[in-house]
Amino acid sequence: MIIEKIKSHIPGSKIKKQITFIFLLSSIIPICVVGLFAIINARKQMLSHYETQLETEAIRVKSTLFDITTSVRTNTQSIIENQSFRNLFNTSYSDDTKAAYDLINSQLETYYSTSAAIKSINVYTDNPDIPSNGHIYCLPDGFTKEPWYLHMSANTYTTWTSAPYVDRFGNTQYELTLIEKFLTNDSPYSTYLVTRLDSNSLRNRILVNNNIIMASIDQGRVFFSSESGWLWKYMPHYSEFKNQTYSYTGPVTINNKECMTSIKTFIPYQSIPYQSDNHMYVLVSDKNAYDNINQITILYSVILLFATLVPLGIILFFSNYFSMRIQTLKTAMHQASLGDYNIIDTFRGDDELSDTFNDLKTTVNYIHEKETIYYQAKLKEQKILNSQQQMEFKMLASQINPHFLYNTLETIRMQAVAHGNRDVSDSINLLGKTMHYVLENTGTESTTIEKEIKHVISYLEIQRLRFGDRVNYKINVPPYLNLEQFHILPLLLQPIVENSIVHGLEGVTQNGHVEISFILEEPNLYVTIHDNGEGMDEETLQKLKDRIYQKNLSTASSIGLRNINMRLTLMYGEDYGLEVDSKNSAGTTITLTLPLSKIIDKNDLFDLYLMRDKYLEQELEYDE
């Protein structure tokens, strides 16, 4: 039935479709079926192989830990079960107990020095009559400050635990620790033998390949890990460890990457060190397993894809050749009809279709040239209009000659000097400097802080002539700062100082004060302008900040401060700008934050740090 439908369908199709259909039916489909089966089977075998390897590795790690912990417990058992040692810690220290005291110290030292797996082995007791010496420590105030005690299992005589220890270099180490309690008969004192395993020794015995290996005790945190970032964190799947025989092999996300993982449990009656109720969990992960499997899968898929697409491409190329050329010509003509003249430059073949395309290309180029001439004429006309506008602007700007203003002010100043009016002469001199600085820096991108400060001083002196003792000022510059080295936007500081006098000192009738300070704190230079005016309450201050930081320019209130903040933000970035702080009866402080990296040369910045450090050292020596 299917064959009959195929026979009836083929003659009714175009040649292009017939060739493609037969080729797909006879070659491509069988190749795809066989290839997909081979890829799926190979992937399953690789997954099984990696899982077996990881389970074997997990068993090896379990065996290694079991061997180490069992060996440690066996060696410490003779000390715990020694009756003379028990009696020693239940009584007062005397000449009669000295022999037992020295013997236990000797045995602990011998075991410590002969076992590479031991980081430390010590006895801790709260019997105040026992002296601290060697491996014996008296803790009369109890054990609550000891890490091993805080993490040990309650109501147990023998337990394994892990706890963070801070070494003498200040580094935190997480070590597997065996805690054994000396059995006593109605003694008010408690004594523990604490054996800490060396993490480096465990690492040397456990880490033999590039797998990720972790180990934890009970449901606690990881005490051993080949990845340092996992120490003292909870092991993946730790919430499932309530099942004391937990076993898992499969994908686990570690360090944001899916890894093939095997997790095994130490079963108490088979593997866990005897006389202990602990359960240890071992995790072994191959971080490259899935990558390798995926790479092989992709490689096989690419091979299969290549084996199907190349023959298919060849067949399709020959069947589509003429229809593609016609479609290309049709598309080019459609683009030209829509006014898009960016058609292809070449056309394959050398026949009537090629001649037709060449005629189309000639027509399109002719239309394109005409449009280009038209747009060039428009641009030329616009350029002439722009030039006329610039000439008109220059004519208007030239109507005010800065030199005329300077000469006029200087003439007035000399007349004041001739008439003995020194105050008028000084005022005109300061005004001339101010106007000269403003006109000189209008349209410029930078100036030095030194010039900016001189301009501010000129302005402040004018205000002093005007208001007298009502306006005073002080400029604080650290000795190691050379203000000529710093380049900032011009006309930044004077508007802020003017704001401090006009608004900050508005209610001050005498002894008004404006203080400008420069503070170097890497990586920024801070400039603060403080006035001792009446200040503002929190509501008024917040309204001022809203006006400064708003982007709506419809209101003219606080436009000077807002413009300064916008200039700093646009020039240096969003992290820089202007901040305002004020309190009632405490004045107002405005702080400018400037990036050192953008306002001073790198070589000068290095020299500046040297001078700053030298100055601070001298100050420190002077204070001492």
Image (cartoon, rainbow, N blue to C red):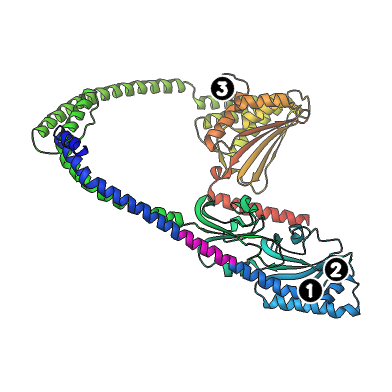
SS of the residue under disc 2: loop
Q: CA distance from mark 3 to mark 1?
A: 84 Å
In the image, is residue 313 part of the stretch drawn in magenta? no
Amino acid beneath label 2: Thr
The residue to which callout 3 is attached is 552
**Mark sitting on residue 81:** 1
**268 or 616: nearer the eye?**
268
State which region is magenta: 50-62
The residue to which callout 2 is attached is 184
Which quadrant is home to the N terminus? top left
Tell me whether the residue at label 3 lies in contact with that at label 1, contact meaning CB atoms closer than 8 angstroms: no
Left or right of 459 on screen, residue 330: left
SS of the residue under disc 1: loop
Up the image or down, 386 lies above or below 494; here it is above
**Mark sitting on residue 285:** none
Left or right of 354 on screen, residue 375: right
Up the image or down, 621 lies above or below 399; here it is below
SS of the residue under disc 3: loop
